[in-house]
Amino acid sequence: MEVLVIHQFDTVIVGSGGAGLYAALEASKKSKTAVLSKLYPVRSHTGAAQGGISAALGNVEEDKAEWHAFDTVKGGDYLVDQQAAKILTEEAIQAVYDLENRGLPFNRTLEEKIDQRRFGGHTRNFGEGPVKRACYAADRTGHMILQTLYQQCIKNDVSFFDEYQVLDLILEKDVCKGVVVVELATGEMHIFAAKAVLFATGGFGRMFKITSNAYANTGDGPAVCARKGIPIQDMEFFQFHPTGIMGLGILISEAVRGEGGILRNNSGERFMERYSPTLLDLAPRDIVARSIMTEVLDGKGIRGDGKIDDYVYLDATHLGKEVLMKKLPDITDFCKTYLGIDPADKPIPVLPTAHYAMGGIPTDVHGRVLKDKNNTVVEGLYAAGECACVSVHGANRLGTNSLLDLVVFGRRAGQHIAEYVKSATLSEPDASAADAAKAWIGRMTDGREGPHGGHITDEMQTTMMEKVGIYRNEQKMEQAVQEVQELRKRYLNVRVQDSAKSFNTDLLEMIELGNLLDLSLITATAALKRQESRGAHSREDYSERDDDGWLVHSLAYLEGDSVRLDYKPVDTSIWEPKPRTY
Ligand SMILES: Cc1cc2nc3c(=O)[nH]c(=O)nc-3n(C[C@H](O)[C@H](O)[C@H](O)COP(=O)(O)OP(=O)(O)OC[C@H]3O[C@@H](n4cnc5c(N)ncnc54)[C@H](O)[C@@H]3O)c2cc1C
């Protein structure tokens, strides 16, 4: 495979979700900017976000950015960097008004203000009770954000390269020089030379069997960085959303509980009263997901057999057809399409589903990528959105804080890039920069006999789901590490059976599998090493949080077949860590 085209831009943004588009909007004001996306831009997973974006506007009830910051820190089980959370929540207010001014059609109160609703873990006055903080456009908030930002980028002449998949990053002497890309329509390889590159490639829920994530969420950005020696931070923390459609994992937004929906076990009991007396069904997600699993394993699931795939009910029947149609129309449609039920008449069968990566590429509050525990910056390289770790979500993200993270830190990264590129130099990378990517594709398409990778995908997802899922222990995670190492070996023999150049999706999926395998190994190893329970990382053998030993961020370096861990301190400069009660 020859490299056919070399492009030159000041700024290259990889990913056209909310984070990538916001960064592109800012960077393009002062620099020649390209957005590369393996999907058509508005098909990015941000478009699937349903429930809302948080900001302490105080439109419906009294609220303050400081309360929002505290909830974010406590919700993240104190692994959040607190100054970053302060920035997130203070800049939230302007960020939401900016989206409104750019044309986003939020739902309105009777006084025509942006309406707000409840979401898990968001409270008034440092935990007294739930507060209405989530701004929303029905249950299509992410879709509206994406459409709004995409239109603005088109207006500002950002160059879009749709269906271009990034394979590798070009680093010369620790300075970022561009990326290596395959154009899906032709199978040609391209090099994009750039002064600054920002990864905004989204999440990687596809490493798990049951997930709310789109097929494209394969963690390409973090995997590419990991192979270049950049550590990946806090990967042991992966969020399971409490309410996926049973068996399918398709998300039923927390907005259903925000509007008053109630979780019930097989005797109809509102069981969250026992687990979270103050916030009930709106406790943070890690707590609700564990409560559901505990009920199920105790034989209080709907079937009552104590098996892991039993389920509970999410009851929204009392909300009435009108509220459901006005505020949760897509959810109503999902229930009709996938379950054949109307949530106005019957409760929804739900189980936790793998949902959100708290960990990712470590960055500072300007989106600059950091390569070690001393926070050394990789020049010219940025990351934002779900693939990055600032860290504002710590060990467990609060609902609606991700869309906020995209716009606040996407924008900050874009602004920083716009300044950085003024003095940075553009140099054309050597064509040998594409050698590793060529060798990778060349091996899988050399025409030799070899197994297809589909089984490997399946086994990886099952291993991660069963052994690195909601409840974890040493034995299961040791097995998971070994199994993923085996799968990585088998992956080296995989051959792609489709020889087409144009839209060879078989090849692309195998590239994505390679990325998921690397991230699975990192996740399982980081989880095995952390000997405590915190947020979404819940161990049967170390069931307590251990601030003396483990109030640290993990940095995982991929080194051949194994993973080396290092650690760095958490910023606790505002609030002293306390036990979490809700
Ligand atoms: C079903 C669902 C509902 C959600 N609801 C909410 C909610 O209500 N509120 C909230 O705050 N959060 C919600 N979240 C979480 C939130 O939506 C995501 O974390 C967020 O949208 C991620 O945005 P992003 O910009 O980081 O990436 P994405 O929107 O996932 O976009 C990733 C982009 O990267 C591109 N890309 C990836 N790999 C490559 C590659 N190799 N080469 C080129 N391009 C590449 C893709 O084409 C895509 O454009 C939800 C998530 C899901 C799955």
Image: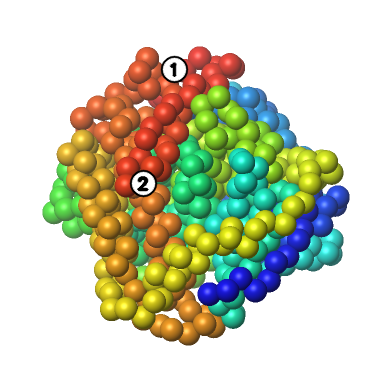
Of 185 and 280, nearer the camera is 185
Drawn side of residue 138 relative to residue 436, left or right = right
Drawn side of residue 209 relative to residue 172, left or right = left
Give the residue drawn at x 30%, y 56%.
Answer: 488
Q: Nearer the viewer, mark 2 or mark 1?
A: 2
Q: CA distance from mark 2 to mark 1?
A: 39 Å
In the rendered image, the vertical position of residue 107 relative to residue 476, given as above or below? below
Residue 286 appears in view = no
In the rendered image, the vertical position of residue 463 relative to residue 509, given as above or below? above
What x and y, as percent, mark residue 362?
A: 55, 37
Where, quadrant-wise, is the C terminus in this rendering?
Answer: top left
Give the residue drawn at x 27%, y 58%.
Answer: 489
Check residue 578 in the rendering and tell me which mark sits there, or answer none. 1
Q: Amino acid at mark 1?
A: Lys
The residue beneath circle 2 is 560
Q: Earlier in the sequence, mark 2 or mark 1?
A: 2
